[in-house]
């Protein structure tokens, strides 16, 4: 796992043809043919279950957002909004376990390789649990997922897909979602 600054994230997004400013704001790309918004009801869903659910969705090859290649990214852009929900000691301990001592605001881009599935899910879980928000994306891919501190996720991809809709229907979660 590696940690990088904002400039690194923007370069990766730009090289995939994604407008970084829009993506970091949680807006869909104008070329997204398939868009979904899911509301996370934290009263019914555990953040770990949501993180695993997102990973499963993002790992479906047929939807154009296959995270089975080398790198997947979580860029945290919303934090400090609900300080009583944050556990900075836990977060910083996880970063130190990865030999990184930079504060989140200096290196908000978390890069995970294919063998770091558990780490990816764990960092996404604590981000949701702490009331943070950010962007999930994969290198070379044109799809993005924005998760908000307000408890919703927005998935946008360039190609329409029935397989994502089927997976959502079979997900077994109590998330409410709309496909547009």
Image (cartoon, grey):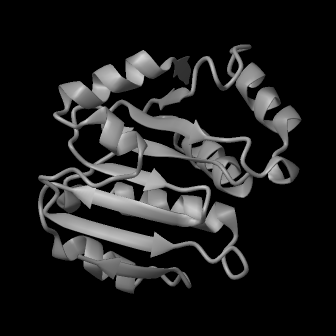
Q: Is residue 74 above or below residue 147?
A: above
- Determine the image quadrant of residue 177: bottom left
Q: Residue at x 19, y 53 (%)?
A: 64
Q: Nearer the viewer, residue 129 or 49?
A: 129
Using residue 103 as the reference point, say whether residue 109 is left or right of it: left
- Residue 7 at what x, y percent from top left? 41, 17
Q: Is residue 85 above or below residue 3?
A: below
Q: Residue at x 55, y 20 (%)?
A: 3
Q: Residue at x 67, y 26 (%)?
A: 104
- Residue 170 at what x, y percent from top left? 40, 84
- Residue 90 at what x, y percent from top left? 84, 37
Total label count? 0
Using residue 6 as the reference point, say whether residue 174 is left or right of it: right
- Residue 80 at what x, y percent from top left? 74, 41
Using residue 41 as the reference point, say whether residue 22 is left or right of it: left
Kindly tell me whether residue 114 is visible in this rendering.
Answer: no
Q: Nearer the viewer, residue 48 or 5?
A: 5
Q: Is residue 143 above or below residue 53?
A: above
Q: Nearer the viewer, residue 9 or 73?
A: 9
- Determine the image quadrant of residue 159: bottom left
Q: Residue at x 49, y 38 (%)?
A: 74
Kindly tell me whether residue 141 is visible in this rendering.
Answer: yes
Using residue 35 as the reference point, say whether residue 121 is left or right of it: right
Image quarter in which the N terminus is found: top right
Image quarter in which the C terminus is found: bottom left
């Amino acid at each position: 796992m590696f940690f990088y600054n904002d400039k690194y994230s923007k370069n990766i997004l730009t090289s995939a043809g994604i407008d970084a400013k829009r993506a970091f704001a949680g807006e869909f790309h104008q070329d997204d043919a398939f868009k979904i918004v899911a509301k996370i009801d934290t009263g019914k869903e555990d953040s770990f279950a949501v993180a695993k659910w997102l990973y499963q969705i993002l790992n479906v090859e047929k939807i154009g957002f296959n995270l089975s290649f080398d790198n997947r990214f979580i860029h945290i852009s919303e934090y400090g909004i609900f300080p009583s929900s944050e556990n900075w000691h836990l977060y910083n301990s996880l970063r130190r376990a990865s030999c990184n001592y930079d504060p989140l605001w200096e290196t908000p881009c978390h890069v995970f390789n294919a063998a770091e599935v558990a780490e990816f899910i764990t960092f996404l879980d604590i981000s949701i649990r702490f009331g943070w928000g950010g962007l999930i994306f994969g290198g070379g891919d044109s799809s993005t997922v924005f998760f908000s501190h307000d408890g919703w996720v927005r998935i946008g991809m360039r190609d329409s897909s029935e397989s994502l809709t089927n997976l959502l229907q079979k997900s077994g979660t109590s998330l409410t979602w709309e496909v547009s």
